């Protein structure tokens, strides 16, 4: 009889050094039960996604982060385009359909029909892990607080998205002509961030062709649910921005005051610089505008002696 919960508990028991748990949805009770099977000195890495509307609806528990903080050698990472369910104990792997929830693992009265298949940790899975982690950001207190605040606000407003925005967006010319940018290389391209909500509302006639192209490209990465008000949209985008690797690196870098050129040099050293259209000055001007627009209380911006200075408050 197929029993994903039993399979995963056995996998956790096998771990001698490292346990990697990857699932879009992770519930606290299921995670606690699984980790009871793992040795206390095993390193635990969890990768999940925190979309505020999913947390608000209860399909995933944000409380897994405080729980993991109580356990030595444990970390939690986010990747919001995550769909894979992948579990590894050292070189033993399980892949399949089951999230880390009681229903998926067969620990409820009416469980899901799920599948987990044992496989070796081969070159293909090593490549998958590398790509997975390149597009992740590690949870810290601020990322946790913002995600929780946004989820609580949506829950209080009884927000129920009717459709995923990404499915409802027209394709841009670049999407049909060029390979899609990888998540680890993404930074916003729309020069006027206030126009992003215009595109989100579908008011494309109010945008220039260039602004429409950039806005649609950025919205496809952010994948914001439909039906948000202007204020909710601003808060939602601000919450997601800090979950993109390059933006999180810039945010960490400006924890101390940085001049314009210093941030341009940082961006030139990151994966975004590999894009053929990369222009460091333009990239930082655009990103700076987004950070001010969508995280308005987080940063200070000044121009002493003709050089812009930016820092995180």
Image (tube, helix red, strand yellow):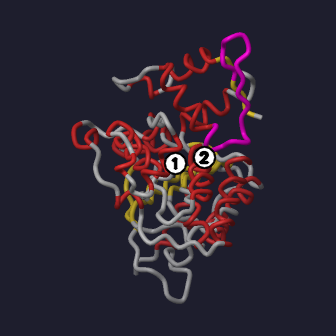
For the C terminus, give its image quadrant: top right
The residue that label 2 is drawn on is 17
| Distance from the alpha carbon under mark 2 to that under mark 1 | 6 Å
Q: Quadrant of the N terminus?
A: bottom left
**Picture quadrant of residue 59:** bottom right
Residue at image x 65%, y 47%?
139
**x%, y% of residue 224?**
48, 56
**Residue 16 visible in the displayed image:** no
Which contiguous range is marked in magenta?
Answer: 292-309
Residue to which mark 1 is pinned: 90
Upstream in the sequence, badge 2 or badge 1? Answer: 2
Q: Secondary structure at mark 2?
A: loop
Q: Position of residue 262 (x, y in %)?
A: 62, 16
In which image quadrant can residue 218 be found?
Answer: top left
Question: Is 173 one of the magenta-colored residues?
Answer: no
Q: Nearer the viewer, residue 168 or 141?
A: 168
210 or 247, which is in the foreground? 210
Residue 310 lies, with reference to residue 10, above or below; the image says above
Give the total of numbered labels.
2
């Amino acid at each position: 009889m197929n029993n994903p919960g039993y399979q995963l508990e056995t996998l956790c028991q096998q771990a001698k050094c490292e346990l990697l748990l990857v699932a879009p949805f992770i519930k606290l009770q299921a995670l606690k039960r699984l980790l009871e099977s793992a040795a206390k000195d095993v390193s635990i890495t969890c990768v999940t996604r925190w979309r505020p509307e999913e947390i608000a609806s209860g399909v995933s528990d944000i409380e897994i982060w405080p729980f993991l903080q109580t356990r030595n050698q444990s970390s939690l990472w986010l990747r919001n385009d995550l769909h894979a369910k992948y579990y590894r104990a050292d070189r033993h792997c399980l892949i399949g359909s089951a999230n880390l929830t009681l229903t998926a693992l067969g620990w409820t009265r009416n469980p899901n029909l799920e599948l987990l298949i044992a496989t070796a940790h081969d070159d293909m899975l090593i490549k998958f892990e590398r790509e997975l982690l390149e597009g992740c950001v590690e949870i810290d207190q601020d990322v946790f607080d913002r995600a929780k605040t946004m989820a609580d606000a949506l829950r209080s407003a009884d927000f129920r998205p009717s459709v995923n925005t990404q499915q409802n967006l027209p394709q841009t010319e670049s999407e049909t002509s060029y390979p899609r940018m990888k998540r680890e290389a993404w930074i916003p391209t729309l020069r006027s961030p206030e126009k992003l909500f215009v595109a989100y509302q579908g008011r494309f006639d109010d945008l220039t062709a260039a602004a429409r192209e950039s806005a649609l490209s950025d919205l496809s990465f952010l994948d914001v649910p439909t039906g948000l008000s202007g204020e909710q949209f601003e808060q939602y985008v601000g919450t997601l921005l800090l979950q993109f690797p390059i933006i999180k690196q810039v945010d960490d870098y400006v924890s101390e005051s940085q001049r314009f050129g210093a941030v341009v040099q940082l961006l030139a050293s990151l994966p975004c610089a590999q894009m053929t259209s990369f222009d460091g000055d333009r990239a930082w001007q655009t990103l700076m505008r987004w950070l001010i627009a969508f995280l308005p209380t987080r940063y200070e911006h000044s121009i002493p002696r003709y050089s812009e200075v930016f820092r995180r408050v």
